[in-house]
Every structure is written in C-alpha cells, then in structure tokens.
Image: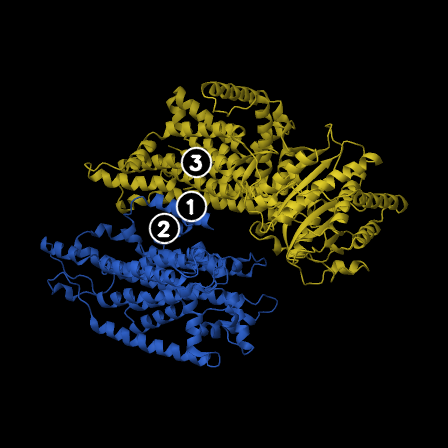
Chain colours: A yellow, B blue
Amino acid sequence: MAAVNRDNEEEVKTDDGSPKIKPRPIVRLGIFLIAHSPVFSVVFSAAGVLALLLLPLLAKNTYISENALMPGSARSMLSNRDVSDGSKLVKDIKNFRLNHEGQGVEVQKLIGKYMSDMGAEFSYQKFHPEGNQFHPLHFFSGPDSYTLLENVSCASYGVNVAGIIRAPRGDGKESIVLVTPYDFINGGDYEDLSLGIVSSLFSLLSRVTWLSKDIIWLVADSRYGDYRPVAAWLTEYHSPSFKVSDLLKCDEQNTADNFRRAGTMAAALVLKVDGRSEKFEDTLSIFAEASNGQMPNLDLINVVNYLAVHRQGFYVKVEKVVSLLSSSWLKIFGEIFEAVGKLAHMLNPDWNFGIPAADYLEGSATLASSLYSQALGIPTGPHGAFRDYQVDAITLKVSPRFPPDSKTRQHDFFLRGARLLEGTIRSVNNLLEKFHQSFFLYMLTSPSKFISVGVYMIAFALLVAPLPMVAASLYIDGCKSLTNSTHNPTENFKSWKWLDAAKQVFTLHLLGFIVTLLPYFICQVPGQHSPTNRSIMWGTTSSSLLLITFVTMPGCSPFSSRLHGTNWAILKSVTISAAFIGLCLMSIINFATAEIGALLLVPTCLMAQPIKPALRSRRLKSLLGAFCSIVLLTIGFPVMFFAISKGLLGEGLVGLSLGGEFWTWLESLWAWKSATYLYIGMVHLPCWLLCLCILFHPS
Amino acid sequence: MKEEKKDDGVMAEEKPYMFWIWTLASTIFRLFLIFSPENINLSSRPEVSTPHTSLRRLAEGYWLKQSSLSPYAGSMYHGSPLLLSILGPLTVQRIEGQSSHHLCSLVFVIADLLSALLLRAIGQKLQKSYRMNLRPLGVLRSSQDRGILPCGDIAALVYLWNPFTILSCVGLSTSPIENLAVIVSLYGAVTRRVPLAAFGLIMATHLSLYSAPLVFPLIFLLGYGLDAPPIKKFLQTRHGGVETGSTSDVSKQEKLTPTTQLPFSWRTVLHFVFWVLVWSSYVLVLCSLSLKQYGGLEEMFKRTYGFILRIEDLSPNIGVFWYFFAEAFEFSRNYLLIIFNLYILLTSIPSLMFRLKHRPCFLAFAYLAFTSILKSYPSVGDAALYLSLWALFVNELTDMEYSFFIFCGYIGFSLSAL
C-alpha cells in the first residue's frame, strides 16, 4: 500500500511541472485518495470493523484436502482383547495406588513393564522443571538453545516414560506421537482413563501390520504442568545435550544412555480425559493454538473432527467465550445479518450467505476465543511444544458422560476413544509427506467451519489502509506549511525535514525497547518481591527514563518551546508510518495480535491532534475531536486496556493490585516467549507515547 | 533502525569531536555484544552468514587442513585459502574461559573500524571536490559554504552504526573483511595511490568474485578523477560568461580542451593495470603455495569461484537464486546459470558505465547495490557496504524528493524480510 502511494506521489510531482500530460488512472486514484483522506480513513476503518464482524458469516465448511488421508475408510481393528488390556492397566495402577501411597517411581515402572510386555521399546527420561525466567534473548532464539540449569537439586524432578513401537512396514524415519499427561504421584481417576485408552490402542498397534510410521507413546509427568515435561522430552529428542546432567546422579535408575528415538514426527496427539461431560454424549474438545498463534494443519483437525462426529459419535467442540453468547449487541448484529441474508435470498435464491442469529452468536464467540488465544500467544495445551519443532499437534480433551468409577461404561468409552485415535493414526500413517495440503493460517468458528487467511486479512487490510494515506497527506501538508512559514538558510534540506520528527520517533521507540527489557533487570533485583512491588519498580524506572529523555533531548518533549518542537503534522505523519510498519510486521508474525492492536492503535493514531488549538477555537467539532482523542489515548494505555478488559470479564480491579495483576500477566507472556509482549513494548507503547506528544504539542 | 544514523549524521555535523565519541561508542557496543554471555545464534542465521562467508565453515576448513586434508573437502569451506591461513589459527585459539570465536570477532571489529576511517577519508576527498566543482558553476555562494555536509563523517558513522554492519560483525561472518577490501580499493583510487587501489581490488576479487567488475569504476576514478558534474555543465557555464579561476584540481587540463570529452589519463591507468597484474600474480603464487598438496589452483578456482557461479548450495538465503535453481529443471540449469551470471554483469556495468562515467564513485555504489541484491549468496553485510557508500553522497541527496517515502519503504521491507 505504501509502495503504491509512494509511486503515486512521485508521479504527481513530476506531472506538476507539465500539466498537459494526464496522469495515469492509478496515479489519479492515489491523488484522489490522499486528497480526501479524512473521509476515506473513516470509511476504511468502519469497513474494517464491519468486516471483522462479518467474519463468522464468511466461514466455510472444512473439508479434507489431502486425499491420501482417507479417514474412516478402513474398518477398525480394535478388539475387546485390546480394550481389556487397557482396562487391566488401569486396574493395576489403581490397586497399586491403594497399596503404595505416593510412590510415583513404581507407577512409572509399572507402565514401563506394560510397554515392554506389548513388545515396545521403552525408556525413562528425567527432566528438571524450569522456572519462568524472563530472558530478553529467548524471544529471538530457537527452542534448542536452552542451557541446562546449573546446580539442579534432586528434590524436584520429573520422569517421563516413552514407549516406541517400531513399524513393520516403515524404515524408522517417521513417527507419530501420542502423549498422555499423567501425574504419577496423585493422578486422579480421569487421568487413569486416558492411560487406559492409549494403552488399549497401543496393544492393538503392537500387533498390526499396516503401520509404516513408528508410534511413540509418551507418558508425560504432569506434576509440573502439562507443557513443561513434553517440552523437555522434545528438547532431548531433537537436540540432546552431551553434558552429563546432575539429574542422572539423583537416582540409581540410570536413564542416560537409553533415550530412545524414532524418526521425524509426522503428527502428535495429546489425549486428556478430564471431568464429566455436561452434555448427553461424551464431549471432545479440540485445542489447537500453539505459541504465537501458530496453528496445526487444518487437515489434522478435520480428520479428528470427521472421525469423532461421523464414526464414534462424540460431541465435538472448540473453546468459545461464553460471556459473548449472552451479549445483546452481538445478538442484534446477528439478527440484522440474518434479515439481510433472508432478503438477499428472496432477491436471488443463489445468494445463501445468511445464517441464523444463534449460529452467528456461536460462531463469533468461538472466533473471539480463537482470536484471543492466538493473540495472547500462549499455547493452549501441551501440543504447543510440538509446534516449536514444526510438528502438527493438537490436544484432545475427552469428557466422559459417566462417573470415572463406573466399570460397565468404561469398556465402551475405551473402545470409542481408542477407535478414534486408531482412525486418526491410520490416516496420518497413510501420508507420504508432512501435512502441507490444507491451511496453516486459519481461524475456527466451529469444529467444522473455518475462516482462511485470505478472508480474515481483508478486515486487517481495511483497518490499516488509512494509515499510509493519512501519512502521505499529512506529510504534504506539513511540508507546505513549513516552506510557507520559514525561509531558513539551509534551503537544501527541503526533502529531509522529516529527520527531526524521525529522530523523535526513533528515540521513543528506543525508549520502548529499553522499557521492554527492564523487567529482566528488575527480576535480577535480589530479594523476594511481590508482583505489585515489581510493577511499581518498573513503572517508576520507566517514567523516570521518559523524563530523562524529555529533559536531555528537548526536541522530543511535548512541553518544549516552539523553537525546538517539530511541526506536528510531520511528526504525526512519521508516527503513523511507524505504526503502519509495526502493525504490518506484527500481522506477519501473529495476525491476531496485529488485528487487536490495530483496533486500538489505528483510531488513536488517526484522531491524535494538538489539544491547544482545539481549546482555543472553542468550536464544537474540534472540541469533540480533542475529547475523542483523549478518550482513545486513555483506553490505549496498555495497563488501562488490561484493566478495562478485566472489568468486562467481570473482575473489577483498582489501584495497586492492578499493577500486580498486569505484571503477572506480562510475566506469563514472556515465559511463553510470546511476540505480543514485544509488540506491546516496541510498537504499541512508543506509538501511544508519540500520540501523547502530539496531543500536548505546543502549536 | 536507520534513523539512528541520521541522528548521528546530524550530530557529527554540529561538532567535530562527536565523530570520535560515536565511533568509540560503536566499538564499545560491538565489544559488548561480542562478550555478552548469551549468544543469539546469529551465526546460524542465513541473513548474516552465507555458505561463502560463514566463519564456522572457515573453522571447519582450517580443521580439515590441519588434519592434512584439502580444506575444500566435503563442500564445507568455499572461501579463500589466504583467509584460511590468517583467520584459521584464530578460530582455534581461545582466550581463557571464553568461546573460541572471540579473537576472530576482534579482527572483524578492527576491520570495521578501519573501513569506517577509510570511508571518512574518501568522504573528505569527495567533499573537497564537491566544493571545488560547485564554485565555478556559481551554485555555491560563500554563505552557503557551511551547508555542505561532512559526508565522510556521515558515511563512516552510517557504516559503524548500521544495524546490518553490526549484525555481520557480531554474527561471525567474514563480510567485514570483504567490505574492507572494497573500501581499500576505493580509497586507493580516490587518493590516487595506484598500488593500494590495485591491491584492494585484487583482494576483494580474491575474497568474493563479484568485486571484479569494480575495476571499471576504479579505472574511471583514476583516469577521469573524482565525481564531478557532467562536463556539459562546465561548458554551459563558461559560455554563459561566468569566468572562473580553476576547476577541479584533478581535471585541470579540461580548461584547455574545448571538446566535450573528459580528459583521460592513460598513464595512471596503465600504471594501475601493471599493479593489478603484479598483485594478482602475487596472490596466485601465495594461494598455490598454500594449496600445493591439495590440488593447487585449479581446485581453488573450482571450489570458490565455481561455487559462486554455479550456485551449488541451495539452502535458503535472502537472495533470489537458490529458490529459482531449486525449482529449475536439471537440463536447463547450465543455460540458466549463464543467463543469470551474464545478467548481473551486462545490466549493471555497460549501461551505468556510459551514464555515470563522470561519477565513478557513484558508479561503484550503483554496481555494489545492484550486485548485493542479485549475487548468489547475498547477506546483510553487502547491504551495509552499499548503504554506507550511499551516505557518501548526502550533499547530492539533500535535494532528493520524497526521501521520506523511500525511507519508510526501505525500513518496512528490510524489516519484513528479516
């Protein structure tokens, strides 16, 4: 967009000298857009918001894109014998638990013994639960550059058990991973069920002849969270550390040299059994969002969804924001869209884009949840660890409709769960390549409906389209006013007048960068501090840094005298360009963050203008504009936005506890290496500060 | 990112000692990045180190050579054997408790500093000739004399503070040394030290084949003199009746010749050619000595220049060729190789040579910018070189229209490319 505009600009200028030549249509379009930029920016922004609201309407039904998958085409081979194997394991574990309280190691050995009885290779892996250390470089480094923590204590470590079935038809270069998080010390009855399902399946897979990819069953020690053990196992799998870890000396059980590997992972399925279903059927929830909003290939979700719905009769759902389901304004929108759809259908029976208002509500609640978890950049389950190694993975959370101790239902439940996994594995087993056929960039509005990147990008593009237009028109205005007002001797700097403004923008961005890094140093401060204290420390250091910047660099301060200050139009133009570049970059890294950020930043940047002339003129229009920009700026402050969104979710926060909450939230962001944190610090905060500077500009 | 250097440029313009402060600061910044305990794995980034410039490969080549194998065995190392002899021992020596690449990084920091100082010297020369040229044209009045920017300082600081340069310096790639060789040759030509210019050219060509066509800008630089407005301008001004004293000091005879031809000093150029031959035979002898047991010069040419021209390594980089040749059919590969390599040579050199023969430095910049996009293994180090050469022409660029939009576009695209 910027490029097009820039080209237009140059052309316009050359045409100014010789008016006889008529500019090309695209140039004229560019001039037209820039000349009427206020109108168009309102139109485009509104269209962007509308397009976002329309997204649930534009969702398409999912389809299985890769033909080789052929889900459900083969008859399930899972027999009652396999299921009784699984039931036996669950029974043994339960009995063992009753007799030996709190002996996790023995349970691991029991599972290991089962695996080897089924003819699988198995190995234990010890890992150390890593603390959530903020490190600025972790954002840029790959997952394999973790350094082993020194002086690990033997007091707390986890042990993963992994079993591998070698495929009779494979060459050992590819594998499929099944993960069951399991707490060996105090795992509940539901967790036992997940072990039962997978061990039933494992018993079958150890016998079948069609397997061409090795099967890995990882029982992850979930005492330290679901994610960490899986990540530790994957790190060991992909980049073994040759340093002898201290953990190995902790126990007589030697785990060093028998870490087993299979080939590259084609796909991974994480199975959890959790809680009782509220529905009449067993419920299957699919979680797919990995770190930084990366999604697994849509085909994987499609296969699971197809098998679960059409073969095993599960009720499949994906996460949704429940509070949106009852929101009245969304309902009104849904009804309007429904009415429009009906009208269109009456006019032309081929136009079938209307959906019922209830569907619209469901769709937008799911979409909102999808957007939210992608924007947060925090994986929604252990499958996120796989995505760091470019392995497609999803978490399946099954909620049975019976209480966990009901023996009769358990058999049926195992049978269906294992058949679902068997079908999925059989489909993935058919693949010759990695998943590549279907979408990687999409958002789900229901388990069987998705919005692809080509559609949801429209909303973002419309939203940010005004930025380059307004930047160009402001730049031209600013240049004109400068040449009219001043005749300084350095006339040859005609086209470099934006340098001062660029300097200010750059300084504030640098400041944002430093503020982003500050938590690293605050975490280094000795002593235990509560999150509230830390946030206060952060706030004070950042604001004092800001003050120092304003004092030492008079050009940057909004309160400077008129001589030092730059022309606000040019400053705003450079700010908007910076915001545009930042948003576009972010949309490549994490679309959802960029979309939500654009919703906040675009109006703020567009509305920002000096407040003083507005107050002086006392006209209603300019006063209203100034009021709007103040309101937008207040909302745009990250802490404020956090508080408001918390308040919308029903948790009112005031005063210092807000700071603590905010700190904890940010801490979770950087612990997961979320790019959203970088976005807030290095794009949003500087642009917000610049808008503040423009607001208090002394012109 | 790039704003920073503008920043510095303005600073340097105001106070002369600021230049040294910023230079020192950039050195400290580099040392800080090198000795900071964490490594960001920059050296494994394809943007920073290409198969041709990676120091890790150089260490591997050195190791092979130590164990009496050809350093080019196994398609790991593709650089010059001389660089191997100089940098190789440094890759295995360690300062106690530090990783082994720190000594090499120090060499790169020194190379960067040297390049910056040479750029400054080039810039001062250019600035002087700019002033000399403008006075007879009557463009420059005494009041505006201060308006000329110290382009040397600006270019040097642009080079030192360019994030691209810092990345390639810290990221263990040998491109700082290649850049130094190119800048040495330009410096030699600008200050009319013919042997130095020839040496720089030969070293640059030896390190990276794409510097070879720089011979044309260098010949122009030696033959015609420094950058100046076209000769037509001078003639027009003279016919217009503005009687002036002297024109550019390098093209003094020009007053005597009423033609529109620029005077071309064949003696200097022949001198230059002679030195080029001397240095190249010298380098070749050294190389053949160092590779005596391992296949000699033929092996070297095959493994370095052949590797560059035949685009053997198809791992992704920021260039365009790897993708193209990964997709191309095997039978058309040779044809396409010829086309692509000729394209670089033929589109850049002849056309620009006729257009810009009165501005050899700018010709060098244009050629470097062109090749840095189209070469087979481009890295950010090449971009650093041409951007700093670009900053040598700030005086001419002050009148550039729409610099803001070009600037925003450049930043946006380079950031999204990373």
Q: Which amino acid does label 3 sit on?
A: Phe
Q: Which residue is drawn at 43% across and 67% down?
A: B307
Which percent across, then down, holds residue A29?
31, 33
Q: Are marks 1 and 2 on the same chain?
A: yes
Disc number lying in front (1 or 3): 1
What is the chain identity of the residue bearing mark 3?
A: A
Q: What is the C-alpha distance between the residues marked 1 and 3?
A: 30 Å
Q: Which residue is drawn at 50% across and 60% down?
A: B171
Q: How many labels does the image show?
A: 3
Query: Do we see residue A532 in this rendering?
Result: no
Which residue was labeled with disc 1? Answer: B412
Q: Which residue is drawn at 74% across and 38% down?
A: A416
Residues tagged 2 and 3 counted as in contact (Cβ below 8 A):
no
Query: Do we see residue B86 in this rendering?
Result: yes
Of mark 1 and mark 2, the one earlier in the sequence is: 2
Q: Is mark 1 on a helix, strand or loop?
A: helix
Q: Quadrant of the C terminus of chain A?
A: top left
Q: What residue type is labelled 2?
A: Val
Quarter occupied by residue A672: top right
Q: Residue at x 54, y 74 (%)?
A: B64
Horizontally, residue B262 falls left or right of residue B362, namely left
Which residue was labeled with disc 3? Answer: A559
Which residue was labeled with disc 2? Answer: B10
What is the chain identity of the residue bearing mark 1?
A: B
Disc number lying in front (2 or 3): 2
- Tell me the number on the disc at residue A688: none
Which percent across, then down, holds residue A364?
57, 28
Q: What is the C-alpha distance between the residues marked 1 and 2?
A: 23 Å
